[in-house]
Amino acid sequence: MRTFFVFAILILLLPLLITNPYYLNVLAFVGLYSLVTLGLSVFIGYAGQISLGHGAFYAMGAYGSALLGMYAALNPWLATLVALILTSLLAWFLGYFILRLKGHYLVMATLAVNLIVYVLLVELEEITGGVSGLPGIPSFCVFSFCFADDRSNYYLIWGVTLFFLWGVLRLLQGRVGRELRALKASEQAARALGIPVVRYKVAAFTFSAFLAALAGALYAHYLTFISPKSFDIFYSVEVVTMVLVGGAGSPWGALLGAFFLTPLPQILDFFEEYKDVFYGMVLMLILIFYPEGLVSLKLKRLRRNNAS
Amino acid sequence: MDLLILSQFVLAGLSAGAVYALIALGFGVVHNATGIVNFAQGDFLVIGAFVAYSVLVSWGMPYWLAFLAAVLSASLVGLLLERLALSRARSKEILLLVFITVGASIFLRGIIKEIWGKRPLILPPVGDAREISLGVFAIDPQYLWIIGITLLAFVLLHFFFRYTLWGKAIRAVAVDAQAAALMGIPVPWVVAASFALAGALGGLAGVLIGPVWPLSFESGVHIGLKGFAAAVLGGYGSFGGALLGGFLLGMLEGLGAYLVSSFKNLIAYGVLLLVLLLRPQGLLGGKAEERL
């Protein structure tokens, strides 16, 4: 918990040092990615399953709240709330059926959901604007104050992310954390102890989808423009890569992955062209040589230091 | 005449189904040997098709050579994936191995884009391109090639698995890898051979569908997922299931394209979801569900 408070203070003070709106924008994106990887890492790390459909949940949060605002005339907060509820219900429904299957059916099922959502976003042009996207999404407002610029959105996004990070850290320390760890160590043993294995898995999946949708809504009302390109399966691959590269099952690993991989496209100029080669390579190498992610390097070093 | 148009869609659907069946079998072969889902399966297809394109169009070689090059190169990529990446993984957890293949798929996609560019490519037709007319029906011979060669491949593989020592070894590993190892079967070799076979099946599918569908570097994901849907529909890991699932899915898509053309792609994904929700063991599969 001390780490958390140090981290939170650093994050909150950072905009005082950085005045360039471009860097703030990148850091706000790190926050958005962190929110998604946070939920996903709990799911991947403890349920031992992978989803390639979080791009769809991200899209449902973004398009859901934008479209509800346009067609049902809901204000952004209310539209976001409704979109979150709908996304969570869908994720729960999918998880409820598929997570009781053995094997890796969930990967394919979620991949299919992502492709379906993507095709719908592109094809239902009259509603979603098709490939050209959906402009003019209103910002979040509280009375007369609107979260319109990079700085205020940075605080909004990181405020939400820190809140959930704190929540997850607290949760993992308590009974739920112990039971999740038991589940991770041995599913059969956990089941024998009376831990509701499937219920935990479904809950973790739904929670991660909820966070992805929340990030999507924050994204939509921050940029005020969305198009299907941001929600294709590459997004899903990207967030899972972040989780695995950082280290699944540790909230800090999730954040590490987001901090490490989000700015890369911005830093490397040639990146657009070689994005696929690079991502594929990093993913393979890390999984082959550091199956527990980058966070395991730090833990090992700490342990070694403590021993000596 | 509507029936004529319908029959064209059915024929196109069946040939797509043949390709899905080959992909589904590729998934099944790898699954039986290792228990993992190989995400690069669809990319094998694109590699096969594009290698054939280079051999045919860029170098002007005959078709049989392109065929051979496509199958061998995709098979080699499969073999390398297993030898260079999967077999070296420090953790043998299924989840991680599956994701190594996801990484490989993205990596291959990037490499394909670097070599052959972003533009979709289409192969020249096999043999005579003229349509064969049977009374009022006109049949594109490409479709006959696809369906015929796929069926031939399935028959040959059936004999391979049933009667040859290698085929029997692969089946033994599928039943129980440990017991197979105790019987003196070199399991690592069988696993590597399974990947090579999966690659070959992908390459074959690619060179078959290449003259009919324009393929781009991204096509692998979609075709791969449809092949997976076919495998799940028929019963994952089963030989007959792959064939049945492939043709059934192809037919459904063909009919779907006849009825609602712009949402054709949703049919395969929808079928996949429905089967996973309602009958996850597939049409021919045994009990795969873990009951609680």
Image (cartoon, coloured by chain):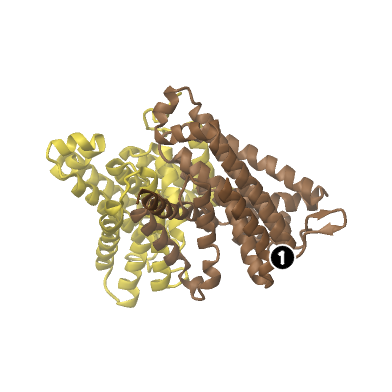
Chain colours: A brown, B yellow
Q: How many marks?
A: 1
Disc 1 residue crowd, few under 14, some 14–19, many 20+, Cα 10 Å: many
| Residue B198 visible, this orientation | yes
Picture coordinates of residue A175 (x, y %)? 54, 30
Q: Is residue B51 left or right of residue A257?
A: left
Residue farthest toward the front in the current orientation of the protein: A308
- In the image, is residue B124 above or below residue A108? below
Residue at 47% across, 71% down: B119
The image position of residue B57, as x and y in percent, is 34, 74
**Residue indicated by mark 1:** A150
Q: Nearer the viewer, residue A267 or B27?
A: A267
Q: Label 1 lies in what chain?
A: A
Residue A18 vertical position relative to residue B136 in the rendered view, above or below: below
Say which amino acid is labelled 1. Asp
Residue A148 found in image quarter: bottom right
Residue B288 position within the rendered picture, expressed as x and y whole percent measured from the top left: 39, 30
A88 relative to A238, above or below: above
Q: Residue furthest right?
A: A144
Q: Nearer the viewer, residue B181 or B125?
A: B181
Q: Residue at x 47, y 38 (%)?
A: A47
**Residue at 19% in and 39% down:** B162
Q: Nearer the viewer, residue B179 or B79?
A: B179
Q: Position of residue A48 (x, y in %)?
A: 44, 40
Q: As displayed, is residue A240 above or below residue A190?
A: below
Residue B267 visible in image: no
The answer to whether A267 appears left or right of A26 in the picture is left
- Relative placement, left or right, of A299 versus A36 is left
Q: Secondary structure at mark 1?
A: helix
